[in-house]
Image (cartoon, grey):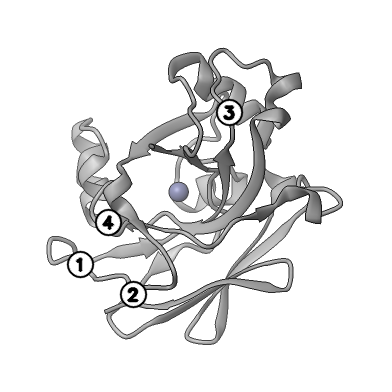
């Protein structure tokens, strides 16, 4: 399986990092080795001094697809979860300045903690879904999928023009504003609506 992650999909987040608001989706990839499950701790990597959390709704692809039309994209996922797109912001900044790819800042081991997945049908409208992150008990990120620049179906359609989607692939759909650094000892609690989806420590 593979992880596709969408960058700059919430206007307020694009602004907070001084990035232009994109006219089409942008994505990058993380390998399977980035996944952390079951609330296991995130181990702070020794090659960065500025690892940031980015809380994101994650889609789980349930069928093979290429060149998927937007109007059919909803058929390609049944389940959603919550994840963190951990980013070594210091390394990413250097990559951006030098025009290098982002992998060392985004694809490292442990950079994609994910929750359990639940059926999207549980929710009346997944395009109006609130989600949040608490850091050491303080609310630091709050988003709603209605604020996405490109909704889920458009993301699936766009990505599948370039990359065949397979069963079990994950799509991180972008983070709202409020990203910030973590440090060893921090606790991260992520929610969709009022339900806790993950709860883990940085070690
Ligand atoms: Zn992200």
Foreground disc of the pair 4, 2 = 2
Residue at mark 2: 41
Give percent across and percent down for residue 60.
Answer: 56, 42
Residue displayed at 62% across by 17% down: 68
Can you say whether 84 is above or below 202 in the image?
above
Give percent across and percent down for residue 87.
Answer: 33, 55
In the rendered image, the residue lying farthest to the left is: 47
Classify 10 Å Cα crowding around label 2: few (below 14), some (14-19), many (20 and above): some
| Residue 149 visible in image | no
Contact (CB < 8 A) between labels 3 and 2?
no
Foreground disc of the pair 1, 2 = 2
State which quadrant residue 133 falls in: bottom right
Quadrant, the C terminus? bottom left
Foreground disc of the pair 3, 2 = 3
Foreground disc of the pair 4, 3 = 3
Q: Does label 4 or label 3 sit earlier along the sequence? A: 3
Residue at mark 1: 49
State which quadrant residue 98 falls in: top left
Secondary structure category for the residue under label 3: loop
Classify 10 Å Cα crowding around label 1: few (below 14), some (14-19), many (20 and above): some
How far apart are the alpha carbons under marks 1 and 3?
A: 39 Å
Residue displayed at 45% across by 46% down: 18
Residue at mark 3: 63
Q: Is residue 144 left or right of residue 203?
A: right
Question: Which of the labelled discs sits on residue 88, or is there none?
Answer: 4
């Amino acid at each position: 399986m593979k992880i596709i992650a969408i960058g700059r999909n919430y206007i307020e987040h694009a602004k907070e990092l001084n990035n232009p608001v994109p006219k089409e989706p942008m994505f990058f990839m993380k390998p399977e080795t980035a996944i952390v499950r079951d609330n296991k701790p995130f181990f702070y990597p020794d090659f960065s001094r500025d690892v940031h959390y980015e809380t994101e709704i994650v889609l789980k692809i349930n069928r093979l697809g290429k060149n998927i039309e937007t109007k059919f994209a909803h058929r390609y996922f049944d389940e959603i979860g919550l994840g963190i797109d951990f980013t070594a912001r210091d390394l990413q900044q250097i990559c951006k300045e030098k025009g290098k790819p982002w992998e060392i800042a985004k694809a490292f081991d442990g950079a994609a903690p994910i929750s359990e997945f639940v059926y999207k049908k549980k929710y009346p409208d997944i395009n109006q879904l609130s989600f949040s992150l608490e850091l050491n008990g303080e609310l630091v990120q709050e988003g709603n999928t209605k604020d996405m620049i490109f909704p889920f179906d458009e993301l699936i359609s766009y990505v599948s023009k370039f990359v065949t989607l397979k069963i079990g692939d994950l799509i991180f759909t972008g983070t709202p504003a409020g990203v910030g650094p973590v440090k060893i000892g921090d606790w991260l609690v992520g929610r969709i609506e009022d339900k806790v989806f993950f709860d883990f420590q940085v070690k």
